[in-house]
Every structure is written in C-alpha cells, then in structure tokens.
Image (tube, rainbow, N blue to C red):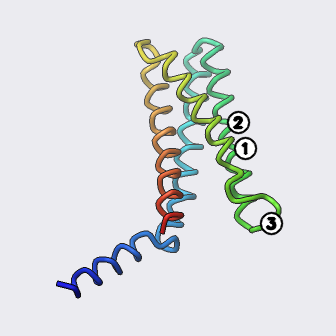
Amino acid sequence: MGQLLVGSTRLAAIALDPRVWWPLFPLLLLIVVATLSASVVWAIRTKAPTRDLVIQVLALSAYLFTAVVAIASEGGGRVPAYAHRLPSLLTQGILLAQLVRIWKRADAKPLRVFNLIAWGAILTDTALHYLMARR
C-alpha cells in the first residue's frame, strides 16, 4: 500500500511538471488571439454596432499587450514573472463586460461564442500557472 502511495505521488509530481505543460501556454495564447481576431473580423463583416467593434478591438489589444508582457517576463530580466496578471485581468474584465452586454442579443451569438472560447483559454492559462506554482 505504501508503494502505491509513493507511486501516485511521483505520478502527480510528473503530471504538474512545467516541462510537461509548458507547450500548452503558446497554444492557449494562439487560441485567444485567433478567437479575438475572428471576433473583430466578424464584427467588421457583419457591420455590428460600433460599440461591439470597439470593445472587441480593445479586448484584442489588451490581450496582445498581456502576451508581450508575459513573453518579456520569461527571460528572467527586469520584468517580474507576475507582471502580466494585471493586463490579463483587464482583458478578462473587458470580455466579461462584453458578454454581459450582448448575452441576450440573438444577432450576437457568434460574438458570444468567440468571447467564451477566448475567456476559457485565458482561465485555463491562469489555472495552469496556479497549479504549476503550487508544485
């Protein structure tokens, strides 16, 4: 029984090893940028209200800034590792505000889907950072 516990502990340590999960971060970044870009394109092509387009461009810009800060903090230079959290929270706030604003509008279903996918990827990124930091 003790051997099984040691084995499962070792398995849990390997499961949260940053070397295993690190490739997910660029994939999540790509998902967020692709879905927010698609939402901007959708808003332009369908002639969505100007407010929708402005909020989507703002969300994309905030997330691109978040990505730049996160990449700058990877090298262990002058930017602290946690510096990208504030712009990430800003992006999440923008997405939440947009979702609340368009939730019941029938013509904005694709925009809701894009924003929910982007927000889900951002939250997944946050959860992975948290799990790996606790290791």
Q: Height in image: 90 above or below 1?
A: above
Residue under the point 53% across and 27% down:
96
Answer left or right for 113 relative to 88.
left
Answer left or right for 8 relative to 115.
left
Q: Which residue is tagged 1?
A: 65
CA–CA distance in space, label 2 to label 3: 24 Å
The amino acid type, in three-letter code, at marker 1 is: Phe
Relative depth, front residue between 60 and 21? 21
In percent of width and height, residue 21 lies at: 48, 66
Helix or strand or loop: what does disc 2 sit on? helix
Q: Height in image: 75 above or below 82?
A: below
Helix or strand or loop: what does disc 1 sit on? helix
CA–CA distance in space, label 3 to label 1: 18 Å
In percent of width and height, residue 134 lies at: 49, 64
Residue 76: image quadrant is bottom right
The amino acid type, in three-letter code, at marker 2 is: Ser
Answer left or right for 92 relative to 103.
right
Disc number for residue 77? 3
Outermost residue on the right side: it is: 78
Of marks 2 and 3, which one's residue comes earlier in the chain? 2
CA–CA distance in space, label 2 to label 1: 6 Å
Residue under the point 68% across and 29% down:
58
Q: Residues within 10 Å of mark 2 (few under 14, many from 20)?
A: some
Q: Mark 2 touching mark 1, by CB under 8 A?
A: yes
The amino acid type, in three-letter code, at marker 3 is: Gly
Relative depth, front residue between 112 and 17? 17
